[in-house]
Amino acid sequence: MILAIESSCDESAMALFDPRLGLVGEWVHSQMALHEVYGGVVPDIATREHLRTLGPMIAQVKAEHDLAKVKQVAVTCGPGLAGCLAIGVAAAKAAAVALSTELLGVNHLRGHAFSPFIGVHAGDPPQFPQKWAELLPHLGLIVSGGNTLLFRLDRAKHITVLSSTRDDAAGEALDKGAKLLGMSYPGGPLVEKLAARGDASAYDFPRGIGNKAELDFSFSGLKTALRYQLEKMTPDQIESTKPDLCASYQQAVIDALVRKTKLALKREAYHSVGLSGGVANNRALREAMATVADRGHLPFLAAAPRHTGDNAGMIAFAAWVDPAARATSASALEIAPGADLAKA
């Protein structure tokens, strides 16, 4: 089995993965309530919370499973908050030494990239290699608070970044839009909740980069457009039309993501389309991306809701399937806060 640890931001998480059975255990400690009062993640608080919780979490895992079966310990080494990563890596080094196992450093973004395939493996582990081959090359969209990008995963498991955002990420844009509307953190889910009963055509917000030949994303103009719209309205008008504002704003984000995905599909042949990252839990986005895949007669692979945010399940799975997750010694593994998707 593989024991995985994730601590890149404000979630302390662990998972156990058996290639023959799939994920046999997952544990998550959320810090959301601690950071909500500050309107965002406070790095120092997040780091201290990881330090407080990772020890007891390892004890819980040990109490519930036989760790003698663990042959590898995997840990997120980047990207993420430096202090948070350091705590997780230190815990993983200690676990690897205590269990006399290999230690693997895993790129958090690559964990997201491979996360839609967790469900494929879980469906029939013995048949996974064949199913995997049939789904490649794969076009993936990662959408989170810190990253928005399209990538190509080829048959050799090589990842090529096709586009990214030039400014704000989609999740960041949703959270900032929510803040402008007077909502608490994290705002994305609150925008989605209000949008469900609003009119998405009530306001015409920009869809990012207008050049049809461009694959890159941009959401800073959308946020500015919302601010200008709100400046024209009274507090009562904003409150009464908030569902319409949320629906229109969210739709602008979704349309931008869908438009660039369609463009990427026109440029090259793919055998599947994937969606992952924290914002992938947005139901409207999942439905829109499923429609894109269906119209292209392609399988749609969306990460399970519990694997869209920061989680150790995707880290364990990536440690097994990703050739970039190479074993290293405890002394050699270092954090990489600024790591990108294309690198280990």
Image: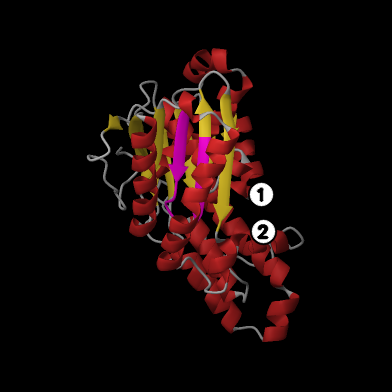
Q: Which residue is mark 1?
A: 284
Instruction: Give whichever of 220, 64 is nearer the camera.
Output: 64
Disc tally is 2
Q: Residue at x 58, y 77 (%)?
A: 229
Query: How far apart are the two marked residues, 1 and 2, measured between alpha carbons?
Result: 8 Å
Whichever of callouts 1 and 2 sits on the residue coming sooner in the sequence is 2
Label 1 is placed on what type of residue? Ala
Place of residue 100 in the rendered image (x, y in percent of width and height, measured from the top left): 35, 29
Q: Which residue is mark 2?
A: 192
In this view, the residue farthest toward the left is 332
Is-magenta flag for residue 6? yes
Residue 93 in the image: above or below residue 52: above
Q: Residue at x 41, y 43 (%)?
A: 109
Instruction: Give whichever of 225, 102 is nearer the camera.
Output: 102
Contact between marks 1 and 2 (CB within 8 A): the answer is yes
Instruction: Determine whether, in the image, residue 286 is placed left or right of residue 118.
Output: right
- Helix, strand, or loop for circle 2? helix
Place of residue 245 in the rendered image (x, y in percent of width and height, measured from the top left): 66, 69
Q: Residue at x 61, y 38 (%)?
A: 304
- Helix, strand, or loop for circle 1? helix
Magenta stretch, residue numbers:
1-15
The quadrant where residue 248 appears: bottom right
Residue 189 in the image: above or below residue 130: below
Instruction: Give whichever of 106, 274 is nearer the camera.
Output: 106
Is-magenta flag for residue 27? no
Place of residue 37 in the rendered image (x, y in percent of width and height, measured from the top left): 57, 74
The quadrant where residue 83 appears: bottom left
Coloring basis for residues: secondary structure
Residue 310 appears in the picture as rendered:
no
Residue 54 appears in the picture as rendered:
yes
Label 2 is placed on what type of residue? Glu
Instruction: Give whichever of 161, 175 is nearer the camera.
Output: 175
